[in-house]
Image (cartoon, helix red, strand yellow):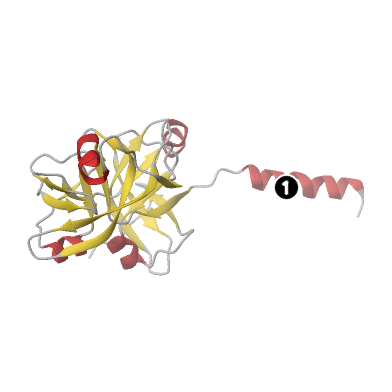
Amino acid sequence: MDKTAIEKIIKQVLAELGKTSDAIPVELSARHVHLSRADMDTLFGFGENPTPAKELSQPGQFLSKERVRLIGPRGVIDNVAVLGPARPESQVEISLTDARILGIDTPVRQSGEIEDTPGIVLSSHKGIVGLDQGVIVAGRHIHMPAKDAARFNVRDGDRIKVRMNSSRPVVMEDVLVRVSDRFNLAMHIDFDEGNACGWKQGVPGTIVTNQEKVVEF
């Protein structure tokens, strides 16, 4: 093979590598708890911080070694993850299946939108906390830095459709776009949604544009 042919192949490979993918990483968000400083003190000891066990995809967020029990009117769920760092208000994110187990009529809300949501009891090996509100089923959403928002031609607060390119492909509607340069690109869905579409590690999503026709029944 002559030098010209080799250079042509190299240019083609580099061009392919340089193409920007339209795929969005999709992650499953398991049930978890965000705690306020006061509730953290009650459950794990005054002044104690969550013990980081694993960094999450979003900068500054981490899975801690600490766990809590969720106690609802009709059932309990043990070994629920606590995410750090502390937040201004405690919040519990569960799936609709979890809500039925606990016996709680839980609305679908975006993180932080906890006004007029149900409460729950949290317990640990050191303490117990009763929340008046804060239990939600987290609405599907995409964390997106500004450069990706420009690339996908979307804005903060947009609600879009995303096709899950999985073994049981579906189009998910009402996906909230959250734009900030504090984010890494990732779409979050819960376990109910992941099971419904046959999600597995590495399965991406693709934004459905207005030009793409989606058959409705």
**Lateral position of residue 158 relative to residue 57, left or right:** left
- Position in image of residue 102 (x %, y %): 14, 62
User: Which residue is disc 1 drawn over?
Assistant: 12
The answer to which quarter of the image holds residue 87 is top left
The answer to which quarter of the image holds residue 83 is top left
Tell me what residue is drawn at x 30 percent, y 61 percent.
Answer: 193
Describe the element under mark 1 as helix, strand or loop. helix
Which residue is at the front of the view, 9 or 116?
A: 116
- Position in image of residue 157 (x %, y %): 28, 35
Is residue 114 visible to the viewer in this orientation of the structure? yes
**Amino acid type, residue under disc 1 in the picture:** Gln
Which residue is at the front of the view, 209 or 113?
A: 113
Is residue 157 visible to the viewer in this orientation of the structure? no
Tell me what residue is drawn at x 34 percent, y 55 percent.
Answer: 213
**Lateral position of residue 121 relative to residue 167, left or right:** left
Tell me what residue is drawn at x 45 percent, y 50 percent.
Answer: 25
**Lateral position of residue 6 relative to residue 84, left or right:** right
Which residue is at the front of the view, 205 or 85?
A: 85
- Position in image of residue 111 (x %, y %): 24, 42
**Lateral position of residue 134 relative to residue 58, left or right:** left
Residue most toward the right? 2
Tell me what residue is drawn at x 39 percent, y 40 percent.
Answer: 61
- Position in image of residue 179 (x %, y %): 36, 34
179 lies above or below 30: above
215 lies above or below 16: below
69 lies above or below 175: below
Which residue is at the front of the view, 139 or 49?
A: 49
